[in-house]
Image (cartoon, helix red, strand yellow):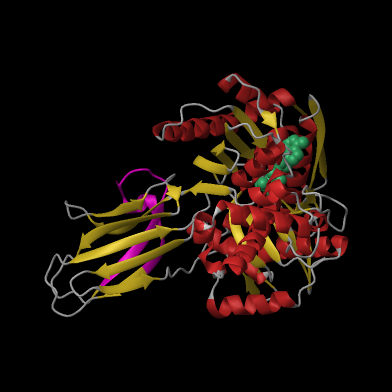
Amino acid sequence: MSDAINKIFGIDLGTTYSSIAYVDEYGKPVIIPNAENQRITPSVVFFDGSEIVVGDVAKESAKLYPNEVVSFIKRSMGEANFLYEYDGKTYRPEEISCYILRKVAQDAEQTIGEKVQDVVITCPAYFGINEREATRKAGEIAGFNVRQIINEPTAAAIAYGTVQETENRVVLVYDLGGGTFDITMIDIQESSIDVICTGGDHNLGGKDWDDRIVAFLVQEFQRQTQSEEDILEDPDTWQDLQLSSEKSKKILSQRDKTPISITHGGDRVKVELSRDKFLEITEDLLERTIALTHEMLKDAKNKGYEHFDEIIMVGGSTRMPQIPDRIRQEFGMEPRMFDPDEAVAKGAAIYGWKLSLNDGLIKRIAEKTNRSVDDEEDIIETTPKQIMEEVAKEMSEETGVTLSAVKRSTMKIRDVASKSFGVVARRPNNQEGVFNLILKNTVVPVETKRTFYTPEANQERVLIRIMENETNEKVVSVEHSIEIGTAVLDLPEGLPEDSPVEITFNLNREGRLQITAIETSENRQVVAKIETSSVIQGKELAEAIERAQHLVVH
Ligand code: ADP
Ligand code: MG
């Protein structure tokens, strides 16, 4: 492939493991191993004096330095109050995540001898506005040009759709990772991938299975030593049990039982954990994934999707044999395990590759037809087929990419809103409620308007509280929503009570929300930038970028 195509890398920024991929000159997605020659890197960060260590070494260091090691940072993405303190400095989740991104990118640069600049980063489908924005910021702090944030199940479906020959099908992607569970229905067609519905729980993942083993071990320790001590209060023991529980869990994916030893305060206790016992103490977790799947299927049914053709499993935790067993039993079909550790990064890379081919195609057409590349949608829609063909052919010859790949690069991905979005207003009974303008699982991009009325005469301004929630109802209580930002609309003087204010929500393809409010009597308009303290910005962001520039991650 010539340099005419700008490489865009795909990064799976996982809760427990991360990885990076690109598409090689044969059009195949390839995972780039890290410096330790592993295809996935633990998303664990160790603050070691002036050095930042990410990956296996960090994970192992947790035993010795439990307070200097940060794991599962993704669970805190978009949280306003999460601050990790080290050596008198505080770090936001975005900055800590940036270290993980830097580690996988830096190692990849070493291996392939090219700079990682443009990237597509994945996030769980149910990530809300703040979490998505935080993910994007993590990439920006790392110094990347973040081309797009795409959903993990969508990425997995892209990887799956490109290995599967053309046949149209509706698939369920059951993604059980280390910290998260995502269930998504996707309609794969030859030239498009549509996300129909999505659900899940961002606090349910392999770690919860580990925690059950930890709890079991604590009990066994107490029983065998006849003590009531909570050995988890000792951070060393806690770390030790975490690591040995995850190891035991993985062994139980292969074997019927596993020996585990617990050392604490000079006592050593041996325990045997059988697979049956493991299934028993984790059964409710598995059942929860099934219940969440049914919930999502109900939503899909309401949208006219009554059945699906297959279930694909991704995420490391689907290696536990009870997962496919239970799915088989529940849905009467054989789930397919699909590249569980790598599908997401590979799918993101394929998507990035399509973006860059598409960029090239648009650029060439724009040159030929004397238009601006900014009219991308327009160019795709209005360029005569013949010119498209011609340009695609030229590009294929120039770059060595097959003609069909160039043509398919305009493939459409349609996603849905992962949450409902609304504003706080008074209900007829005068109580506050959240009026949803965009409902969960609506196809994006989407724009909706709604008119509200000022409650008082001579009001100087309207404060618009922008809310996010998981429900599918038009009006929900404030307690069931989280506030993602506010906007202020200044009003002209002397407006009567009940003056109309029109609010427009626009959710783009990537799940970014823009809000416009118009006071209709004098037609004043504000484009509300969502102000939120949950995501790093301003001076703090600039400082983080500055710090990251000189950063070498080990
Ligand atoms: P994430 O995307 O959330 O980082 P992954 O999809 O990489 O997660 O999955 C990581 C999880 O998979 C971890 O909890 C890990 O313990 C679990 N896992 C990996 N291999 C196995 C296995 N053989 N058996 C059981 N669990 C496994
Ligand atoms: Mg994952």
**In this view of the protein, which residue sits in the foreground, 136 or 539?**
136
Task: Please give the count of numbered marks on the rendered protein.
Answer: 0
Q: Position of residue 203 (x, y in %)?
A: 57, 46
285 or 187, which is in the foreground?
187
Q: Does 472 appear in magenta?
A: yes
Whether the magenta-drawn stretch holds residue 552 is answered as no
**Which residue is located at x 64 percent, y 64 percent?**
364
Q: Which span of residues is magenta-colored?
A: 462-486
Question: Would you place residue 101 above or below residue 323 in this image?
Answer: below
Question: Residue 219, relative to residue 526: is it above or below?
Answer: above
Q: Residue at horizontal 15%, vertical 68%?
A: 456
Q: Position of residue 357 (x, y in %)?
A: 68, 57
Is residue 257 visible from the viewing direction of this image? yes
**Residue occupying the far front of the picture:** 386
Instruction: Where is residue 468? Give x, y as percent.
Output: 41, 54
Residue drawn at x 37%, y 67% is 486
Relative horizontal placement of residue 328, taking residue 256 as reference (left or right): left
Quarter occupied by residue 114? bottom right
**Relative height, residue 349 to residue 48 (above, below):** above
